[in-house]
């Protein structure tokens, strides 16, 4: 999508509201609560689930299903850190409704178009609900831990060794553009979920999976080694992943950073500690004077709709890393607090005077607006309190959500393998269509005569 260009009206609005940025004092909890409530309200302006004719769990066009999963993860953070339950009913309804008939976040309305990364971001939201002890669904509905395990299991069963020696493809189905691409966000999300499930359940089989995914990403060059830990975008299966696309995105860096932090917190392994610290120091490529930036697209003004939400996940994953690994806290909170004050100045646009922008360096609104901008701003603001709340719960220290290690594999309609329509299937379908057509014509003639 081409970025929105400032129109005269937007520029005028910026001038009118420039002096009315969010009032923010990070030493005053009430100030932070007031500021985040305004940003969350703006986020929910895009929600369709409570509007006539809208779908529960979906946001307005052009925001895809995956970003809705990301948005509810953001709202969970808003509830938890700000002690604000305004949208809890909407969160609960959406995350249960979009789980689908098989409780694996492959709902019928997305079952032919979603990719591995799309499914993963709903699974991450469910994992967050479990770790935060969010209100459990009714006993006859899917539970948060179960949903996260179902997402992990269905993704793990798509591990593909036919090309590149392993890894997940970007897309689930052969007919979708991107099926011939293996990307870091899909594989990084599988690693990330495995790490969180290991810590929550105490089941080391998840550690084995996390190590498997990480090692594969490192072997293919998706993750660099040595003094830096950069995460690159992915590679094509057509050349066996021999040529890596070296774009770097904040959410990929955050997935690997926080996944390593979970594994260190769980295992106290020096390997995962070192990887956490290297990933953190390497994250500086996304900071400009300690303010977060989507370096691959933001300076050039080329961020598309999806990319404008990436900093939301980066901020979220930085916050949980600070909770899990004490030695990261000084650096992370320096970045978080500096970004928060920059966000407050950016959230000064629109007709409401607190619409948030994309570029947080200007001291004012930049004319950009949307769901991604609101999510990113809100995650930064609420995660300034990451150290004032307990870290993620697990099954032994307060987590109450129930799961099943076999979640997602008990039914036959799980879309575990890509659907491949063969020539024979097409021919059979053509014959059936012809027979039905002839039958309809015969019935019509019988009625007429």
Image (cartoon, rainbow, N blue to C red):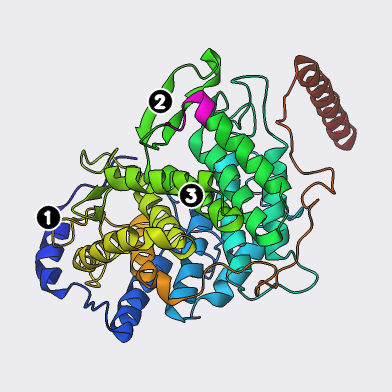
Look at the numbered disc 2 and give the secondary structure of its residue.
strand
Query: Camera-side residue: 286 or 416?
Result: 286
Sequence-first disc among 2 and 1: 1
Q: State the separation of the CA atoms marked 3 and 1.
A: 51 Å
**51 w.r.t. 196: above or below:** below
Find disc 1 in the rendering and name its residue.
8
Q: Quadrant of residue 319?
A: bottom left
Find disc 3 in the rendering and name its residue.
273
Look at the numbered disc 1 and give the secondary structure of its residue.
helix
**382 w.r.t. 236: above or below:** below
Find disc 2 in the rendering and name its residue.
245
Badge 3: how crowded within 10 Å, few (<14), some, or many (20+)?
many
x%, y% of residue 80?
49, 75
Q: Is residue 145 left or right of residue 356?
A: right
Residue at the (28%, 46%) spot, across then down: 284
Q: Which corner quadrant holds the N terminus?
A: top left
What secondary structure characterizes most of the magenta part?
Answer: loop
Residues in magenta?
218-225
Sequence-first disc among 3 and 2: 2
Badge 1: how crowded within 10 Å, few (<14), some, or many (20+)?
few
Q: Is residue 222 magenta?
A: yes
Q: Residue furthest front?
A: 270
Q: Is residue 396 magenta?
A: no
Q: Please indicate, yes or no, whether residue 86 appears anywhere in the rendered image.
A: yes
x%, y% of residue 375?
39, 61
Q: State the separation of the CA atoms marked 2 and 1.
A: 38 Å
Residue at the (61%, 60%) spot, across then down: 127
Q: Of discs 3 and 2, which sits in the foreground?
A: 3
């Amino acid at each position: 999508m081409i970025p929105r260009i400032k129109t005269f009206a937007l520029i005028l609005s910026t001038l009118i509201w420039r002096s009315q940025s969010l009032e923010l004092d990070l030493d005053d909890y009430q100030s932070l609560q007031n500021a985040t409530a305004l940003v969350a309200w703006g986020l929910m302006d895009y929600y369709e689930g409570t509007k006539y004719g809208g779908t529960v769990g979906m946001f307005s066009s052009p925001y895809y299903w995956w970003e809705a999963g990301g948005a509810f993860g953001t709202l969970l953070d808003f509830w938890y850190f700000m002690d604000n339950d305004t949208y809890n009913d909407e969160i609960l309804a959406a995350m249960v409704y979009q789980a689908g008939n098989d409780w694996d976040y492959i709902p019928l309305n997305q079952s032919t178009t979603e990719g591995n990364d799309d499914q993963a971001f709903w699974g991450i939201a469910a994992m967050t609900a479990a770790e935060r002890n969010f209100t459990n669904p009714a006993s006859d509905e899917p539970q948060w831990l179960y949903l996260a395990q179902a997402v992990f299991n269905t993704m793990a069963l798509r591990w593909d060794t036919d090309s590149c020696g392993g890894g997940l493809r970007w897309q689930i189905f052969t007919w979708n553009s991107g099926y011939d691409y293996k990307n870091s966000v899909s594989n990084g999300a599988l690693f990330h979920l495995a790490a969180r499930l290991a810590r929550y359940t105490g089941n080391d089989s998840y550690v084995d999976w996390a190590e498997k995914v990480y090692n594969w990403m490192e072997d293919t060059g998706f993750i660099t080694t040595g003094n830096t830990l950069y995460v690159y975008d992915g590679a094509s299966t057509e050349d066996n992943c021999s040529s890596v696309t070296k774009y770097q995105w904040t959410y990929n860096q955050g997935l690997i950073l926080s996944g390593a932090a979970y594994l260190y917190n769980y295992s106290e392994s020096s390997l995962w500690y070192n990887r956490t610290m290297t990933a953190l120091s390497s994250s500086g490529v996304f900071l400009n004077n300690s303010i977060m930036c989507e370096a691959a697209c933001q300076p050039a003004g080329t961020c598309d709709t999806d990319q404008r939400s990436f900093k939301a996940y980066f901020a979220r994953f930085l916050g949980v890393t600070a909770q899990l690994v004490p030695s990261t806290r000084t650096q992370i909170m320096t970045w978080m607090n500096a970004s928060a004050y920059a966000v407050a100045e950016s959230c000064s646009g629109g007709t409401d005077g607190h619409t948030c922008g994309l570029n947080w360096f200007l001291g004012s609104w930049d004319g950009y607006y949307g769901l991604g901008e609101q999510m990113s701003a809100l995650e930064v603001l609420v995660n300034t309190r990451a150290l004032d709340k307990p870290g993620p719960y697990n099954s032994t220290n307060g987590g109450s959500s129930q799961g099943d290690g076999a979640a997602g594999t008990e039914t036959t309609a799980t879309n575990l393998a890509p659907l491949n329509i063969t020539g024979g299937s097409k021919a059979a379908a053509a014959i059936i269509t012809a027979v039905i057509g002839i039958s309809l014509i015969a019935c019509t003639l019988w009625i007429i005569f």
